[in-house]
Amino acid sequence: MQIVEAQQVRQSLREGKRVYATAAISPSSNWPRAYQKIGGIDFVFIDSEHTPLDRGTLSWMCHAYSAMGIPPVVRIPSPDPYEACKVLDGGAAGFIAPYLETAEQMRQLVGVARYRPLKGARLQEALRDPSSLEPELRSYLEARNSATIFIANIESVPAINNLDEMLAVGGVDAVLIGPHDLSCSLGIPEQYNHSRFAEASLTIFRKARAHGCGAGLHWWQGVGDEAYWAKSGANLIMHSTDVTLVTQHLQRELNELRERLGESGSPVETGAIESV
């Protein structure tokens, strides 16, 4: 079942259709069933870059979400092909590679997404010249990797400058902006309403769509802004994370309770919580 759903995610991303996802980093057995009941979630984004999830926990989470018919896509801790292989071996439907900046980094990760289980000199030969693959091997690899979702995090000025060359490698399903890192690379940390942040994001969307890739950014600061990004070219709607959503909702309800009960003093702060 996961294969069909993951293939649909890949196709939708590349065709510019909207794909809805959310980050899930809490390893409770209650979350996969809850997300299934919500409906409308095309895949979950499990982060192992900024969280202390170990390999065994990640694998359990991947299998649990897969059992609920929700493809799990894991962000690996570094843009390392072997890290990508590990999460796929653990049951992930795909991977997100953080902080990619060069075409060569992209090429090596495409090697995992489209040529797994080839490694070593045989893989490098295939990446240089796909026609070097025997027809039987090529058919096998295409079938085996047809459902592997590969999303590249674009989070820096060098990545934007090199993006056309990176995407020309092929084999990438979507790019995903990391807003916090991108704002820091632009020299405007956490100024998400700054014109330079908007200009950089729109440039990423435009370049991705020109190469037939999906595009989006991981957003947690309100659905109004998120709708704006979607209308401006983002078709990957990566909405918030479980911890952020629970915390924001709990703060709002506690503030409302205090107000209804006439308690004095300042309400609890309800500022945005940075997503992973």
Image: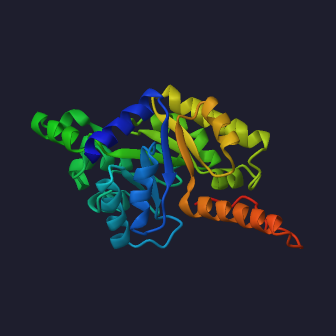
Give the image location of residue 23, x and y in percent: 51, 56
142, above or below 247, in the image: above
Residue 56 placement: quadrant: bottom left
Q: Nearer the viewer, residue 16 or 121?
A: 16
Q: Nearer the viewer, residue 220 or 77?
A: 220
Residue 247 placement: quadrant: bottom right
Q: Residue furthest front?
A: 261
Q: Quadrant of the C terminus?
A: bottom right
Give the image location of residue 197, x and y in percent: 72, 43
- What's the residue at 41%, 39% (across, down)? 172
- What's the residue at 54%, 41% (across, down)? 237
Give the image location of residue 50, x and y in percent: 54, 66
Q: Nearer the viewer, residue 103 or 74?
A: 74
- What's the residue at 25%, 42% (across, down)? 126
Q: Nearer the viewer, residue 105 or 238?
A: 238
Q: Is residue 210 at least partly visible in the picture?
A: yes
For residue 265, side relative to residue 76 (left or right): right
For residue 126, side relative to residue 213 (left or right): left
Q: How is the image coloured?
A: rainbow
- What's the residue at 65%, 34% (across, down)? 202
Q: Please tell me how many numbered marks the rendered image carries.
A: 0
Q: Is residue 79 at least partly visible in the picture?
A: no
65, above or below 262, in the image: above
For residue 112, side relative to residue 201 (left or right): left
Q: Quadrant of the N terminus?
A: top left
Give the image location of residue 22, x and y in percent: 51, 51
Residue 15 placement: quadrant: top left
